Image (spheres, rainbow, N blue to C red):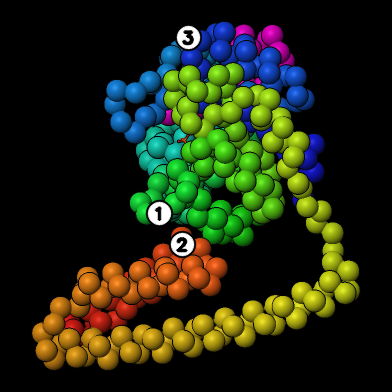
Amino acid sequence: MTEKKDLILIAGPCSAESQEQLIETAEGLAEGGLITYFRAGIWKPRSQPGFFEGVGEVGLEWMAEIRKAFGFSIITEVGNAAHAEKALKLGFDALWIGARTSVNPFYVQEIADALKGTDIPVFVKNPINPDLKLWLGSVERVEKVTKGEVFPIHRGFSLSGNSRFRNVPNWQIPIELHTLRPDLRLICDPSHIAGKRDYIFEVAQKAMDLNYSGLMIETHPNPHAAKSDAKQQITPERFWEGINNLFIRKNLPPDPQTLSQLKKHRESIDVFDQQLLELLAKRMEVSEEIGNLKNKTGISVLQPERWKSILETAHINGEAMGLSYAFIDQLFKAVHDESIDRQTKKVNY
Ligand code: PEP
Ligand code: MN
């Protein structure tokens, strides 16, 4: 378990906008304690054209000035080999690869090749789509050619559907990554997951509860006026307040009494999980019977009205039982997918 003092803290604005803005942010951050890296985007990959695309190369020099004046280590985003070379030349202490780049093996390889033989730490954001192998593949491309530590950053996934957050966290994916590669120190970017400043520390706390090693949080002296990601940036004061309020659980071995209570609960969970599987298997058998009927009578497999009413009922009943909207949504969509699959096989046998 990482203690609070050992957390890797990356803070600074989404984008470098002016030298004054960087200095003001750095002053605010310097007041609260020590951050591991001061961040700012210089080249901004925007989903759509017409938005602020960063100040470009001059921002690298502003960042180098911050390094000199405040003693902060500095980090920025690189999206291609030329960016990486320029940042290396100006003495950046670390680099990150963004979500719109880690999705593309050509670009990641190009950046990795530009960093060949260096020992610069590299942070790799998860790709925008929920593909664990692609994320790990990007991490590995960098690991293969550099000697520095490579850190995955979890920033959530672009998925349609109903979520309070800008990017759906899909916590199972980083959990699986941690299971496959427990040696990698995982960082959470609650700013890009949340999308709204009020949710940032709720997400950060969850990351702490899941043993993440650090946080990247966008901070701006005047968040409302930020040229990018204005809704999710927070002032340095709010950053330190949130960090100070984080609760880090101790990873102590449980005492015998707790252990026996845990054991009892886990046994109940195992029983319920078995019942869930049996129920799902029975449900799918019924789906196949329906598939047989549809096959005989030529009715189409997807009946949108019926599906709509199943989902609506599940949401109403689920909510009454305290189950979250997002959970019911995911669960029933997965069940429906499997059911359609079974029926399709019956219809096309
Ligand atoms: C950012 O950190 O400002 C950024 C563009 O992040 P992401 O690649 O996660 O969208
Ligand atoms: Mn941003």
The one of 306 and 219 positioned closer to us in this rendering: 306
Q: Amino acid at mark 1?
A: Asn
Q: Considering only vertical position in the picture, is 307 above or below 51?
A: below
| Residue underneath mark 1 | 162
Q: Nearer the viewer, mark 3 or mark 1?
A: 1
Secondary structure of the residue carrying numbered label 3: helix
Q: Magenta span has 315?
A: no
Q: Position of residue 111 (x, y in %)?
A: 46, 31
Is disc 2 surrounded by few (<14), some (14 to 19) or many (20+) residues within 10 Å? some
Q: Which mark is residue 66?
A: none
- Quadrant of residue 73 in the image? top right
As drawn, is 339 to the left or to the right of 265? left
The image shows a total of numbered marks equal to 3
The residue under label 3 is 58
Using the numbered discs, state the Cα–Cα distance from disc 3 to disc 2 in whole angstroms: 46 Å
Res 325 label: 2
